[in-house]
Image (cartoon, rainbow, N blue to C red):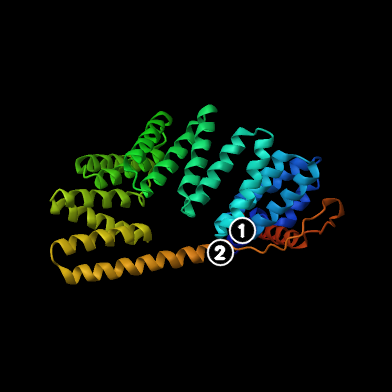
Amino acid sequence: MQKLFLLLFVITFGSSTAQNFDSLIVVSLKMNSDTEKVNLFYTEGFKGRLFSPQFAYDCAKQAEYFSIQSKSQKHLAKAYNLIGVLYYRKGDLKKAMGFHLKALELREEINDEHGIALSETNLGNIYGDLQKNELAEDSYLRALQIHNKLSNEKQTGNCYINMGILKMGTNSLEEAEKYFLNAYKISKILMDYELEALCLNNLAVINIKTNNFESSIGNSLDALKTRDMTGNEMDKTDSYINLAEAFYKTGNQKECDYYLNKADSLCNVFDYLDAKCELKRLQTEIYEASKKFDLAYLSLKQYLAIKDSIVAENKELMAQNNFSEERAEVDLNKHIFKFPYFMLSLLLILSISVIYFIYRNRR
């Protein structure tokens, strides 16, 4: 009986919390203004972008519909922002860019500085993915300028990270290091341990590239301490790989092997493909240098196989983020209310089960 009760509870609770589009329509019927309706559909759509892209897209289109009805440029920009985010996750960068440019134009017209910075960051991400590095840099710098002006330290730190990664990708290591150090200073002020660890790991990578191995070891060990504060075990893998490479470069094979084993263990526990790929790259380099060509060849094959797996996983993720664009926006004034018979039946069954359970177990 207890198992039955638990099952019914899970089904009912899941049904009541798993938001669907029709239930949002019912809620929005009670709202007086179109802008309130936009905020509702935007908020729920943004939440749903991770687990239900179709639901999120339907919400975004409904938000667009009511923002047009309200004649609010601020709210229309929000709707375009969400649509752009969904196309970005889908992998359609051209459409994503188009909607973010629309959002940016509206936000510039009304001088919505926070919104402008958000749009510029989204565009910077797209330009970076398209290898349009100058455009990406321009967008990130405009966002950075606004966040500095608004004293938004958290977003300023994120902009520094974006710029650092962009510069590291173009091998402008000195500039990248400056951006990561700026982000690191902000992380210490905010006591943001995730941001701090991210900065330290990126600095450790730059240290290795510039042959500053002692600094790389120090930054990696500090990153591990910070990860202990957040309980983030998976991301310790990156620090272990950095440590292994730094110790290898300094000729300390014992420490190198120790951190290689720790990294390999975490890669297997979390199935962390990006780290596995980097680990196999490093192992291939080490085996080649020690003339263990059979092991080097095996590691290289594994490295290439993992790279293929990452590509396949990204394609699968984009497929999961697909959605139909055929949604017709609903005019709430013409919406016909549908009585929730299924929900009522579940609640009735649950109520009867609870009464029966109490009756059977009374003392």
Spot occupied by residue 11 in the image (x, y as percentages of width and height): 63, 61
> Is 294 displayed left or right of 176 in the figure?
left
Residue beneath the point at 12% across and 51% down: 251
Q: Amino acid at mark 1?
A: Pro
> Is 292 displayed left or right of 111 in the figure?
left
Spot occupied by residue 221 in the image (x, y as percentages of width and height): 26, 42
> Is 181 displayed left or right of 348 in the figure?
left
According to the picture, the residue beneath numbered tag 1 turns out to be 53
Spot occupied by residue 100 in the image (x, y as percentages of width and height): 61, 47
Please give the label number shown on residue 320: 2
Seen in the picture, residue 196 relative to 102 is either above or below; the reply is: above
Residue beneath the point at 71% across and 44% down: 76
Asked which secondary structure carries label 1, the reply is: helix
Q: Are marks 1 and 2 in contact (CB under 8 Å)?
A: yes
- The foreground one among 75 and 362 is 75
> Is 57 displayed left or right of 334 in the figure?
left
Q: Earlier in the sequence, mark 1 or mark 2?
A: 1
**In which quadrant of the rendered view does residue 13 lie?**
bottom right
- The foreground one among 15 and 76 is 76
- The foreground one among 161 and 337 is 161
Disc 2 crowd rating (10 Å Cα; few below 14, some 14-19, many 20+) is some
Q: Is residue 242 visible?
A: yes
Q: Amino acid at mark 2?
A: Gln
Q: Is residue 363 visible?
A: no
Residue beneath the point at 67% across and 64% down: 324
Asked which secondary structure carries label 2, the reply is: helix
Disc 1 and disc 2: Cα gap in Å? 8 Å
**In which quadrant of the rendered view does residue 54 lie?**
bottom right
Seen in the picture, residue 156 relative to 347 is either above or below; the reply is: above
